[in-house]
Image (cartoon, grey):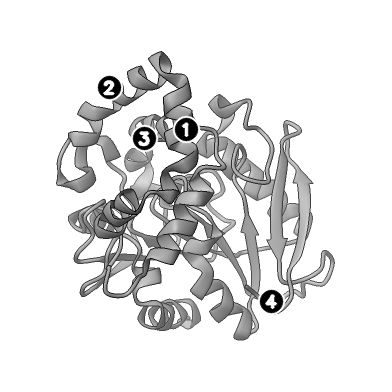
Amino acid sequence: MMKNEFPAYYYSFDGTRIFYITNFKNGELKENDKVIVFNYGLVCNRAHFSPQEEYFDKLGFKVLIHDYRSHYSSSGQDRIEECTFKNIAKDINGLCEMLNIHKPVFIGHSMGVNVTLEYAKLYPNELSKMILISGTVLPPQDIMFDSNFVDIAAPFIMSFAKSNPKIYDFVWSHSFKNPILRKMVLDGGFNKKQVDDSFVQLYMKKISELPKDLFFHLLDHMKEHDIITHLENIHTPSLIMGGDSDKVIPNYLQKILQKYLPNSEIYILKDGSHVPQIDFPVLINERMISFINRT
C-alpha cells in the first residue's frame, strides 16, 4: 500500500471502464514529476508489485496502478475477446493523457512485458524507459516450464471446462483453498525460501475473481502476438530482468529479448524465480532505481 491512494475510473475510447489508483490527485502532476506505471502479468494483480509500489512512493515518485479491461474492477468481463494488447495499450495511453502523464517509466512483469512492448510499438515517443521482468516474446505455450506441456494440455482443459462447466467453475473459484494446489504454485512460480503460502493464497483467490475463460484467451493472444518482429524498431531504454531459477519462463528468453531489443541491458538475479521482484525486493528495487536515475 502507498501512503496516499486515490482510486477512480477512466472511460476508454470504446466506453470500457478502467479502474486505476494513483498516489496523487488529478491535476497535481508537475512537469518534472517522474511517474511509474505498473503492468502486471497473466491473471496477476497489483500485489505482484507491492514492494515496488511502496518503495517508489516513499522515494517521492508518482505511481499509476490500473486494472486491465476484463480484469477485477475494470469492466469488460462479458467481452473478453476485446481484451487485447492493442486495446490495453490504448486504454493506458488515454488514461495517461487524461492524467497529464508524460514520459513515464513502464514496469511490466510476465504478460505485462507484452503490454509494455505493445505500448512502446504504438507510442514510440511516449515512454522514457521500460523495465521488463520475466517476459517472453515467443509463444508461452512452447516454452513454459521449458516444454510444450501447456500447449498439449490446454485443449483438454478447455474441453473439460465445456463439458463439465459446474465442476470447472467450482475448481476455478475454490482452488485457493487447496493447500496441495497452493504448494504446486509456490514451488513452480516462486522462490519458496523467500515467499510464503499467504502470498500464494491471495494470488490464487484473486484469480478466482476473474472470468474463467480469460486465462486461455490471453494465453492464445500471447501466442499470436507478433511483437518480436517489431523489437528492432523499439529504441526506448530498457532494463530486462529475470531470475536464474525461473521455471515458468526460462531465463534464456530474457537473453533473446536483449539480443533483439536495441538500447537494452540485462540483469539476471541469482536464485530468482518467475517473480524476482517478490523474492528479492530490495535487490530488485535497487537495480531499478539505478537504471531509472541514470541519464
Residue 85 lies left or right of residue 183; in this view the side is right
**In the rendered image, is residue 131 in sight?**
no
Frontmost of labels 1 and 2 is 1
Q: Vertically, is 72 above or below 141?
A: below
Q: Vertically, is 162 above or below 91?
A: above
Give the CA separation, mark 4 to mark 2. 49 Å
**Residue 18 percent across, percent down from the top left:** 70, 45
Instruction: Decide which of tag 1 and tag 2 comes sooner along the chain.
Output: 2
Hey, what amino acid is under mark 3?
Asp
Give the CA separation, mark 1 to mark 2. 17 Å
Q: Badges 1 and 2: C-beta atoms under 8 Å apart? A: no
Q: Assess disc 1: are there few (<14), some (14-19) or many (≥20) residues with their C-alpha within 10 Å of its C-alpha.
A: few
Q: Vertically, is 57 above or below 91?
A: below
Instruction: Decide which of tag 4 and tag 3 comes sooner along the chain.
Output: 4
Circle 2 sits in a helix, a strand or a loop, which is it?
A: helix
Residue 102 lies left or right of residue 9; in this view the side is left
Residue occupying the far right of the picture: 27
Q: Assess disc 4: are there few (<14), some (14-19) or many (≥20) residues with their C-alpha within 10 Å of its C-alpha.
A: some
Q: Badges 2 and 3: C-beta atoms under 8 Å apart? A: no
Q: Vertically, is 57 above or below 186?
A: below
**Residue 263 percent across, percent down from the top left:** 35, 64
Q: Badges 4 and 2: C-beta atoms under 8 Å apart? A: no
Instruction: Report the disc number at residue 170.
Output: 1
Circle 1 sits in a helix, a strand or a loop, which is it?
A: helix
Instruction: Report the disc number at residue 226.
Output: 3
Circle 4 sits in a helix, a strand or a loop, which is it?
A: loop
